[in-house]
Image: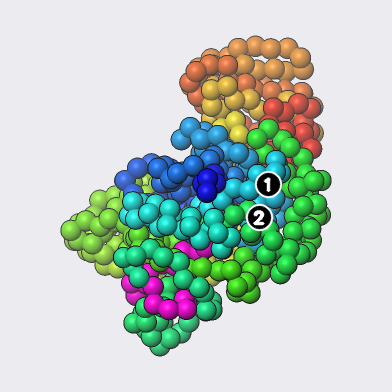
Amino acid sequence: MKEKSLIPVILCGGSGTRLWPLSRASYPKQYWSLFGDSDETLLQQTQKRLHGLKKLSDPLLVCHEEHRFIVAEQMREIKVEPKGILLEPIGRNTAPAIAVAALQATQQGEDPLLLVLAADHAIRDVEQFLLAIEAGRIDAEAGRLVTFGIVPTAPETGYGYIEAGESLSKDNLQGLSIKRFIEKPDKESAEKFLSDGRFTWNSGIFLFKASAILSELNRLSPEIVSSCRAAIEQGISDLEFLRLEREAFANCPNVAIDVAVMEKTNLGSVLPLKAGWSDIGSWNSLWSTSDQDLDGNVIRGRVISKGSRNCYLRSEHRLVVGLGVKDLVVVETDDAILIANRNQSQNVKNIVQQLETNGSPEAKAHRKIYRPWGHYTGIVQGNRWQVKRIEVKPGGSLSLQMHHHRAEHWVVVKGTALIEKDGKEELIGENQSTYIPFGCKHRLTNPGRMPVELIEVQSGTYLGEDDIVRFEDRYGRISKLISE
C-alpha cells in the first residue's frame, strides 16, 4: 500500500504561566528559545526535528489570532512555508484545534496522516523520536488512533498516565491497545505506575489519518465537528492565515482530545517513546532538562556565578550575579525579576493569578510588544506623555492611520524611514525627526535593507493603543481598532 503523506499539526496554544516572567500571554513560552544551545525557539525546534520523516509535508499550525504574526515570522526564519495557519479567536482546547486541522487537511479530498504535536515540548533524542513516529505509521495507516506514551523515569504526579493492555517493549516499537487514561495521580499511585511496564506518561503527541479522527469525533463528539466546519466555512482567508469565525468556533465544547475521543474510542493505540521528552512545564523541569555545568547550574545571558549550585540563572537584559546561592531560579526581564526556590517553581502560576487580580500589566504583556512590521518597547510614561523605542524590519510598514487624542514626534536613530503625512512623502535618516499632529493621516515604511530604529514621543489626553483609525494596512488589520 502506498504510504500517505504526513502533515505535522502543530498546536501553538497556551500561555505558559508557570514560566513567568519570560512566558506571558502576549508572548508565551513556545515562541522563546529555552532549550538547547541554539537560538531556535521551541516552535522552530518542533518543526525542524521532523526532518527525515518519510513523505513529510509542510505543517498546519493552529494558534491564537493575537500570535499569528509571531508564528508566521518564526516559520519564515527557518524557511518553512506552512500549508496554513489557522487562527483561533478564543481558546477551545485540543479537540477543536485538531478538528479544524483535520477538516482543513481533507478539503481537497485527500486523507493524509496527521502528526499532532505541541509547540512547547523538548526532545533530547531526536533520532529515537523519529524512529517512534515511523513505527507508528503502521497502526495509523490501518485506521488506529496512535498516541505516544513517554516511558516514565520518575514517579511524576504532574502528568497524566496511559495504561496499556499489556507491558510495552521499549526496544520493540509496537503499538498496544489502551486500557485507560489516568489523571494526575497521587505519589503512591505514581510509584506503582513507575514499576509497572504498562504505564507511560501522556505526551499529547498523536498520529492518525485525518479521516479516522474525524470519524471518531463525528461519532463521539459531533457538535465539535459541526461547529468547526461552520467556523471554517464562515471564516476569512487573510494572507497565509485562515481566521475561524468567532461565534461558530465559540460554540465548540472546550475539551481535550483525550476526553472527547481517546478515553472513549476502541481504536486507540499507545506506542512507547523514550527520547528525553519534556513538556517544560516549570522552571524546575527546564533546569532538569537543560545541560548543566559542573556545579549543576544552567546559565543563560549576562550571568556571573561564583560558588552557586543547582541553580537556573537567566538574564535577558541586565547583569545577574549569583554568589553562593543554591537551588534557586533567577530570571530577569525588562520589567520583572523572579527569584524562587526551584522546588517552588510550580507555584509561579499563582503569582500570575495574583498579578491578574491586581490588574498588573506585567501579568500578561512584556514592555517589548511584537507586531508584523517589527516591535516596540515602552521606555517611560507620564500622565500625558510616553516614550517608545520602535524597530521596523526591512520592508515593514505601519498602517496608514491617524489618532484623535495624541500627537507623535519621531526621531530616527538608525536607518532611513519613508514617512507619509496627509498624502505627502519624505525620507528621513539618522538624527532627523518629524512631527505628526492630532488628526494627521500618517504612515512609516522601511524601504531599506537594514532595520529602522526610532524614538517615538507621544503626548495627548489619551495614549491608549486603541486610539487608532486605520485606512490601509498590508497585514489585514483594517477591521481592528487596535495597534497590532
Secondary structure state at the residue bearing disc 1 = loop
Residue 392 at x, y percent in the picture: 56, 27
Residue in front for this viewpoint, 245 or 164: 164
Identify which residue is drawn at 56% across, 63% down: 144
Q: Quadrant of the C terminus?
A: top right
Identify which residue is drawn at 62% across, 65% down: 257
Residue 371 at x, y percent in the picture: 60, 37
Secondary structure state at the residue bearing disc 2 = helix
Drawn side of residue 214 relative to residue 452, left or right = right
Residue 145 at x, y percent in the picture: 56, 63
Drawn side of residue 192 relative to residue 84, left or right = left
Query: Residue flagged by tag 2: what amino acid is it?
Result: Ser
> Magenta segment range?
145-168
Tell me if residue 21 can be seen: no
Drawn side of residue 412 relative to residue 255, left or right = left
Drawn side of residue 208 relative to residue 253, left or right = left
Q: Where residue 106 is drawn, which disc sits there?
A: 1
**Badge 2: few (under 14), some or many (20 or more) residues near its Cα, within 10 Å?**
some
Alpha carbons under labels 1 and 2: distance apart: 8 Å
Tell me if residue 56 can be seen: yes
Compare marks 1 and 2 and give the one earlier in the sequence: 1
Query: Could you say which quadrant of the image residue 473 lies in?
Result: top right
**Residue 32 vertical position relative to residue 16 in the rendered view, above or below:** above
Residue 210 at x, y percent in the picture: 63, 53
Q: Which residue is mark 2?
A: 211
Residue in front for this viewpoint, 452 or 270: 270
Q: Are marks 1 and 2 in contact (CB under 8 Å)?
A: yes
Identify which residue is drawn at 66% across, 69% down: 260
As for residue 278 lying within the magenta part, the answer is: no
Query: Could you say which quadrant of the image residue 418 lies in?
Result: top right
Q: How did the renderer colour the structure?
A: rainbow
